[in-house]
Image: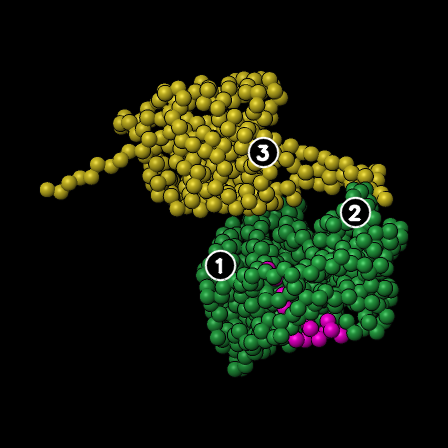
Chain colours: A green, B yellow
Amino acid sequence: MSTDSTKLAFNDGWQYAPAPESIDHIQIDDHYGLFINGEFVAPEIDRYFESLNPATEKPLSNIALASEKDVDRAVKAARKAYTGVWSKMSGADRGKYLFRIARIMQECARELATIESLDGGKPIRESRDIDIPLAAAHFFYYAGWADKLEYAFPARTPVSLGVVGQIIPWNFPLLMAAWKIAPALACGNTVVLKPAETTSLTAMKLAEVFRDAGLPPGVVNIVTGAGPTGAAIVNHPDVNKVAFTGSTEVGKIIQRSLAGTDKKYTLELGGKAANVIFADAAIDDAVEGIVNGIFFNQGHVCCAGSRLLVQESVADEVVRKLRDRMETLIIGDPLDKNTDIGAINSAGQLETIESYLSIGQAEGAEMYQSDCSVPDQGYWCRPTIFTGVSQSNRIVQEEIFGPVLAIQTFRTLEEGLTKANNTPYGLSGGVWTDKGSKVFKMTQKIRAGVIWANTFNKFDPTSPFGGYKESGVGREGGMHGLGAYLKLEA
Amino acid sequence: MAETRIPVAKTYKIYLGGKFPRTESGRYFPLNAADGTVIANMCRGSRKDFRNSVVAARSAFAGWSASTAYLRGQILYRIAEMLEGRNEQFVSELVLQGASKRKAVKEVEASIDRLIYYAGWSDKYQQIFSSVNPVSSSHFNFSVLEPTGVVGILAPENSSLLGLVSNIAPVIVGGNTCVVLASESLPLCAISFAEVLHASDVPGGVVNLLTGFKDELRDQFASHMDVNAVVFCDGDAEISKIIQEKAADNVKHVISRRDQDWSSEMSQNPYLISETQETKTTWHPIGS
């Protein structure tokens, strides 16, 4: 592949004045307890863990570590709220609470966005324009369903499940909480939620929102901690449903441990999406789509377009333009409004990504990283692409969850399709072509739950999301997302 | 000696294109309390007012119908918030028009909840009424709803606020714009509701509210060539027939909502939205 590049010297010649979001308007407590039965309580055993700012490696707050007993307390509170209040309440009234929560989130949006970027490392532009508004929109959307459930399931009577346990990842902390909590509550369930251990802060702020909205105590309980806390939720005998978003590896463990129980579950797991560029695509748009597909949120996206499949006749042009575009990406302070790529979420994740960079090179692929400078402190990874990779390479088959793109070529539609479908995953996919009929051919044949045509990484509360194959079970979002939180009686 | 403050009485005007003009005709009709005292001089809207309203509704249609479902939902929710804040004003107007306090409170609360109900439908009715059609050829074929356009609404005579809200909300949540003739005998709430709309980011012209005489204006609602649908809530069989005949001039949708109990929850449903929608089907080839 030709590597001629008309490189743009953004890093030296073009300096942006820093435009950092101020943090004087936010309130982060020194310690956060567990949110059980409507109030923050100390964990049974006095253990706390630090939540770090991944851009500075400095601690932001201390988060309670929930034990099995704490989880039991939370489940009991959820059960009591379910039996005593929430399952008896009319759908319209449940909806009013959810609308109120959405409104308060909109009011606090700037604070929530700032904390999300501080705690998780994502660029403020993304948390401000995507994560937080979408999270509020999810509450708004499902609020409206609360009194309309019978319209979604003709000739069936939708009935709530009871207490649902929800475990969410660190890549979209508040948004994932909203994806999980809003439909569960709209359908009449109560919740025990565990945020990821590196990103608990916005979940704690969300608990404050619930409290301020007057949500009855126990309807949502938030327990913080790591894997063992999550396992305690999954294995609790009084939990009726488990919703998990995270790695395929953990998803399989959860599916096994639920075997033989009556618990319902939905699993939203890993991905290795192919972003397929045909020769007749609008190439400049496609390059933007590739960048958005893999560098959005540092590539910490289960549906990221982490495999680029480009038709051979335009491969040189696409790669050249992609490399040029990569040079313009600004990596650094997540709170700076100029920043395109923020901090890697944790030291552990950075290690994982770096090990894949070594694996890719050891397998014989050619690695290219943009020239941009990175700060001294914090966890960073330059935008990276690999060319000369083959289908069996680990960087093609395995989810890296970082800003790392594996590039392959294809000649015919069928070859592109075969390569696109040749991984164990099936979460999402992208198609770039000027020809509508080809779009629909591809969307018909790609074995994945979400396909973006001439766009990528678009999300909306009305649109279902979830994967085929080892990318998961069930759908979240939209009307289809309701089914995960209901049983349908005749 | 204690001075008694002289209250300032409100002038009730019409709501047209986002403004509150008087009727162009300069005419009025008195609204009397049970004891015969005059509560207000209402505008006796003219056919010209109606035509001007249709022009305003038509110009607002492009923007409103293109706005996102999410935005329309937010705006309907905002209307409910504003109405909740003015709760007492509407209760006192209903009482002034002869309702008991208890009934008035109930009517205002039901009106707020009805707005919330339809706010919730904004981004959902499409999901329950649309379809992907499995045609027997290599085509992706789908049908979606689109708003029909400008809707004329002859609001129910016996329900000053709830009946009005129950008919406006499903029409505008679906992206239509409308011209409404308020209840002739209970017109106060309609004009105050226009003020609520005005304070809720509803673009001017999306809802136009007239007061006046049904017998004078009804035919215009039915026959106007730039109105796409007419909703009427009262009238006997003969009036129905006249409306339907006149509607045929430009093949309007005619929607009769006579004898509805607007206080019942049965009178809120997504079919009230779909009644003022068109179905559009698109065929698209699948292939390489």
Residue A348 belongs to the span the image colors magenta: yes
Q: Mark 3 points at which residue?
A: B62
Q: Is mark 3 on a helix, strand or loop?
A: helix
**Foreground of the two, A58 or A50:** A58
Q: Which of marks 2 and 1 is in front?
A: 2
Q: Mark 3, residues whose alpha carbon is within 10 Å: few (<14), some, or many (≥20)?
A: some
Q: In this view, does B228 lie above or below A480?
A: above
Residue in the image at 52% along x and 62% along y: A21
Q: Report the number of numbered marks.
A: 3
Q: Name the residue under label 1.
A: A108
Amino acid type shown at disc 1: Cys
Horizontally, residue B94 falls left or right of residue B58, namely left
The dot on residue A441 is none
Discs 1 and 3 carry the same chain letter: no
Q: Quadrant of residue A113?
A: bottom right
Residue in the image at 55% along x and 39% along y: B173
Amino acid type shown at disc 2: Ala
Discs 2 and 1 carry the same chain letter: yes
The dot on residue A281 is 2
Residue in the image at 65% along x and 53% along y: A459
Specify the quadrant that holds the N terminus of chain B: top left
- Mark 2 and mark 1 lie on one chain; the one further toward the N terminus is 1
Q: Mark 2, residues whose alpha carbon is within 10 Å: few (<14), some, or many (≥20)?
A: some
Residue in the image at 65% along x and 64% along y: A12
**Residue furthest out toward the left:** B1
**Residue furthest out toward the bottom:** A46
- The chain letter for the residue carrying disc 2 is A
**Foreground of the two, A362 or A119:** A362
Q: In this view, does A458 lie above or below A260?
A: above
